[in-house]
Structures are given as C-alpha cells and as structure tokens.
Image (spheres, rainbow, N blue to C red):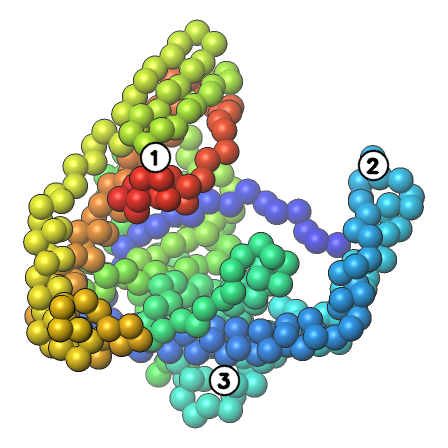
Amino acid sequence: MPRKPRPTFVHEMPLRTDRKQAHALNKRFDVAHFPYNIVVQVMLERLASMRADPRFTAACKMPKGEKGEDATPEQQEQYEARKEAFALLRKEYAFSEAASHKVVAEHIRASNYLDILIDSHTAQTLASRAFGACDRYALGKGGKPRFKGLGTIASIEGKGETSPLQWKDDHVVWGGKRRDRRLVLRPIFDKRDKKGVEVHALSSRVKYVRILRRRVKGEWGYFLQLVCEGVPVKRFETRDEEAAIDLGPSTAAIVAPDRAALVSFLPTIEEDLAAKRILRRALDRSRRATNPQCYNEDGTWKKGQRQTVRSKHYCALRAQLAEQERAMAERRDRAHGQLSNIVMRDFGRIVKTEKLSKKAWQKMWGRRMK
C-alpha cells in the first residue's frame, strides 16, 4: 500500500567551493549522464519487446472499466482485469523501477571507474528519473525520452539519511566513509534572514539533499537544495476568499468579490533586444567563417549538414548569450512569484483560472513569448 505523501518544501543555498572541490564536482556531474542513458536504452528496448507481444495488443483492446464509488461491480472487474494483464507483462519483461536499479548496478560494477565517482544511491535516483521518463512515454503522457549529452545533467540527489550524499549539522557530506571519495561542501548562509526562512528550513527534518550545477557568468556555480519535511514559512497573511485570474500575453485581469484589477503580466521585465540581436549576428558570422562546407553558394544552409567547428570566439559569444537568457529567466521567475503573492495576499488564496497552453501562445505569437 503506498504511503501518504507528507508536506514538503525546498530551501536553496549557494555552495562555497574551492578549485579542488569544483574539479571533483565537475567530474561527478560529467559522468552522471551514463546511468541515465543506459537505463533509457534498456527500458526502451524492453518496452518495444513488450509492445510487440500479442498479449499487449489483446490487453489494449480490453474494456477499460472504471474504479471508485460510482463504478458498477462489472466496471470495477473490467478495470482490475486490464490492470492485472498489463502488470503481468511489465513483470515478465522487467519493465519497472526496481529493474532499472538492477540494470544500472550491473553496468556500474562492470566499469572500472564509475563506481569511484557515482555511489549506488545516486545511481538509483538517476535510474528512477530515467525510468519515470520511459514510463510516461509508455503511458502516452510524454514524448520519447532523449539521451543526455556530456554535462547536461544539472542536478544530483541522494535518497535519505543513510545516503552517501547527506546533510550533517551545517554542511554536506558526499562520498561515504572512504576519505579519498569524500567531499565536504559548506553552504553560504544568509546572515540577515529577515523573515526567518532559513532558520525554519535548518530546524526542519531534511528528507534528502540535492546538488545543482548552473552556468553563471560563464562559470559553473553549485547550489544546495535541502528537501525538508513540513510547510515553508508563511511570510504574509492570505485572504480566505475566492479569486479569478485571466492571463493574457501582456496583462492579467484579477477579480475578487469586492475588488478587481488589471495589472501588467511582467512589469519588471525589460529585455535588451538590440544587444541580443548583435550577439546573434556575431554568432552567425563566426559560424559561417568556420563552417563554410555547411552553406550553399547563395548563403542558405545545406540540408543534412552539421556544425563541426566551434571557435573560442564562438564559444565566448554563446556563453554571453546564455548568460543573458539565464538572467532573463530569473527575472521572469521572480516576477511570476511577485504576481502570485499579490493575488493571494490582496485578492484570495483560492484561485480559479482557465486552462491555458503556453505552446498555443508560442504558435500564435512565436517563441518570443518565452
């Protein structure tokens, strides 16, 4: 019987790392894609074999039925029969999260160096992440999982208090009992902490630890996330009312029983489009100069060609553009949080809105919508 989920919140802090620690973290993050990719490869192969089985086609044609209080006994029986048929197929073809843990353990033991960099708990969390993507694809709830490239895994997490990656007193220990594999990482605490957010997080029970790697101003930055049990600090009183919000491409209409407002969707966002245009043109010039084999005589791209040469100047320009996009993403996230706080504080905590699709907005107004 599955356990009831308990309330959980996340508190993030930057990590203070020296050159040696940054080098060790980079090595571990750079090999984290291997457990993910091997699980995706094996699970997709098993899924294809399972779908090719005639019993899978027969199970898909079975009536779905229903479950719950409103369902009839016949509908519940149909639901259980279909569920059991798929469960038997999954068990026979070893398409499960536990099977993914076995797959990644076998491959890590067979290698000569991965067991030094990746512990078993970290490998299992990466395997669970990969199997979750394959499971959503099998159920039709997501697209086909893609393989991760070198250094594209942005977060690594432990499994609990017994994990080699854990929180102890005021620092993070990653590596277990062996000193040659152990990393001691110390976060940068907020000394002011006006609202008591950090004090509340550090006094709560830590379920598990997650380490993130982000590219900040052209260099890797490391951050610590404590996944704590409980609820976060309530920084302001919310109105116990119902509110409705209608989001548009640039404005948001908010309505409550006794008040209404039309506010700008992202009032603090001012993007320097001219600087971005200059960077993109410089990138295009560099790409054309270093990869002339990819272009036709009229300047158009040759179909089927791939960019093979990236100069140092090109990489520097690309880092500048990525930094500009990262800063804009942080501003957008901050503006979204401010708008959410305004709605709950001034209008009501029970928010009703229509179902919107950001993909539809991008199709209508382009990817400029962000």
In space, the residues marked 1 and 2 are separated at their CA atoms by 39 Å
Tell me the element at label 1: helix
Q: Residue furthest top?
A: 258
In the foreground, 78 or 301: 301
User: Could you tell whether 291 is left or right of 42 in the image?
Assistant: left
Instruction: Determine crowd level at label 3: few under 14, some 14-19, many 20+ residues with C-alpha closer than 10 A.
Output: some
Residue at numbered disc 2: 69
Residue 345 drawn at (x, y percent): 39, 21
In the foreground, 75 or 30: 75
- Snapshot quadrant of residue 221: bottom left
Which callout, 2 or 3, points at the residue further toward the start of the chain? 2
Residue at numbered disc 3: 108
Q: What type is the residue that disc 1 sits on?
A: Gly
Whether residue 167 appears in this view of the structure is: no
The label on residue 337 is 1
User: Could you tell whether 280 is left or right of 135 in the image?
Assistant: left
Residue 54 drawn at (x, y percent): 78, 73
In space, the residues marked 3 and 1 are separated at their CA atoms by 41 Å
Q: What type is the residue that disc 3 sits on?
A: Ile
In the foreground, 3 or 174: 3
Which callout, 3 or 1, points at the residue further toward the start of the chain? 3
Tell me the element at label 3: helix
